[in-house]
Image (spheres, rainbow, N blue to C red):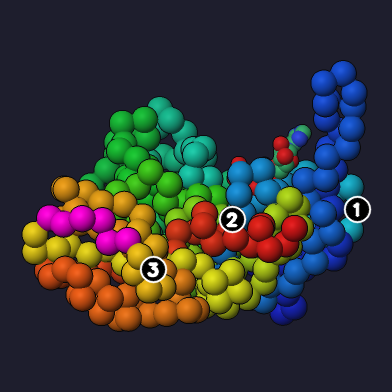
Amino acid sequence: MNSVFNGGAIIETDGLTREFRIRDGRRRRLLTAVDGLTVRIEPGAAVGYIGANGAGKSTTIKMLTGILVPTAGSVRTCGLRPVPDRRRLARQVGVVFGQRSQLWWDLPVRESFRILAAIHALTRAEEAERTAELVEQLELGGFLSVPVRQLSLGQRMRAEVAAALLHSPRLVILDEPTIGLDVLSKQRLREFLISERQLHGTTLLLTTHDMGDVERLCDRILVIDHGRLAYDGDLLGLSRTVGAQRVLVVDLVAPGPDLIGLDGAMHLSSEGGGLRQRLAFDAEQTTALKVLAAVSGKAEVLDLTVEEPDIEDVVRRIYAESR
Ligand SMILES: Nc1ncnc2c1ncn2[C@@H]1O[C@H](COP(=O)(O)OP(=O)(O)OP(=O)(O)O)[C@@H](O)[C@H]1O
C-alpha cells in the first residue's frame, strides 16, 4: 500500500525558517516563528516535538506538510519538497490534530473511511484489509455506523487516528493526540501507535504537553524554544540537562505539621490537615529514598508515590538555561 520510498531521512531540514509580518501596536515588524531549524529524522523513529505555547511547533508542522512556505532554509519530508510535491506527499504522511476533526461530521465513521480510501486510491482489497485491521486494533467496531458528531471524544480520536492512518503512511504527525482523553483512551491510543510502529516501521512525530505520551512513545525529543532548537536527545538526557525536579508525595499515618526544613527537599503543599504532603527534590542532588528517610525521622509514613517531572517544568527550565 505504501508508495515506494527510497531510503534516506524521513524528515530533513536545514536552516528551516519562517517569519511572519505582524502588527505590533501601530508598527509592523517581523516575527521569527521558526528560526534556523536543522534536524534529521530517520525512518522508524518516534520523536516528541515539545515546547511552550507559541514556540513554533505548529508552524514547523505546517512547513513539513506543505501548508506553509518557508521564508528561508530547506525542508524535505519523505524525500519530497512539501509545497510543490504536496499531493505526492499526502500519500506518505498522515496528520492527526487533537483539536480539529478531519472526519465528515454528519456521516457515519464507516463512510468517512470509504471517502478517504477513494481519495487515496486504495483498491477494494486494500481498503477492506486495512479497515479491518484498524477497526480491530482501535476497537472501532461498536460505532462504525454512528455519525461522527455523536461520538465521545475518546471514540472520535480513535476514529481520527484510523482515518489518518488508513492509507498506511510512512510518517504520522500527531498534534496533541491525547489532549482531553481519559486515562483508558490515552492508553489504548498509545498502545496502538506503539504496535503500528512495530508492525509497519511507521515514523511518529508528535507534539504533546503530556509527559506520559513522551515517556511511552518517544525515543527522541526535540525541544523548541522561540523557534530555535533548544534540545535534541532522549528523555533521560533531557531531565538530566535541566535537573528537573521530582516530587515525593507522602501519606502520613496521622495529620501533622508541614514537613519543612528537610535535607534536600522543599515542602510544596499539604492536604487533609497535613495527612498528604508533597515535597520537591532535585534528582541530581538526592534520591527519593533519602528524602523518605528524612521524612520518616519526623513522621510515620503510610504510603508514598513519586511524581515524575512535569513536562512544562522541564521545558521552563530549558528556557531558563537557554537565555
Ligand atoms: N499566520 C500567522 N501570522 C502571524 N503570526 C503567526 C502566524 N502563525 C503563527 N504565528 C506566530 O508564530 C509563533 C509560533 O506559533 P506556533 O503556532 O507555531 O506555535 P506552537 O508552538 O504551535 O504553539 P501552540 O502550542 O500554542 O500551538 C507565535 O508567536 C504565533 O503567534
Q: Can residue 60 be seen in this view?
A: no
Q: What residue type is labelled 2?
A: Arg
Assign ligand 1 to one image quadrant: top right
Regarding mark 1 in the picture, which secondary structure is present there?
strand
Location of mark 2 (residue): 316
Quadrant in which the C terminus is drawn:
bottom right
Residue at image x 48%, y 45%? 98
Marks 1/2 in contact by CB < 8 Å: the verdict is no
The residue identified by callout 1 is: 72
Query: Which marked residue is nearer to the observer: mark 2 or mark 3?
Result: 3
Q: Which of marks 3 and 1 is in front?
A: 3
- Residue sitting nearer the eye, 103 or 288: 288
| SS majority, magenta | loop
* Residue 263 seen in render: yes
Left or right: where does residue 253 sit relative to residue 121?
left
**Disc 1 to disc 2, C-alpha distance:** 28 Å
| Magenta span includes 154 | no
Q: As drawn, is 36 to the left or to the right of 7?
A: right
- Give the distance between the C-alpha atoms of the residues marked 2 and 3, in whole angstroms: 20 Å
Check disc 3 and give the amino acid type.
Ala
Q: Which numbered disc, 3 or 1, marks the residue that appears first in the sequence?
A: 1
- Image: magenta residue range: 255-260
Q: Mark 3 points at which residue?
A: 265
Residue placed at 35% from the left, 47% from the top? 181
Q: Which of the two discs, 1 and 2, sits closer to the camera?
A: 2
Seen as rendered, the residue at the extreme front is 261
SS class of the residue under badge 2?
Answer: helix
Residue 42: % across, % down: 67, 76
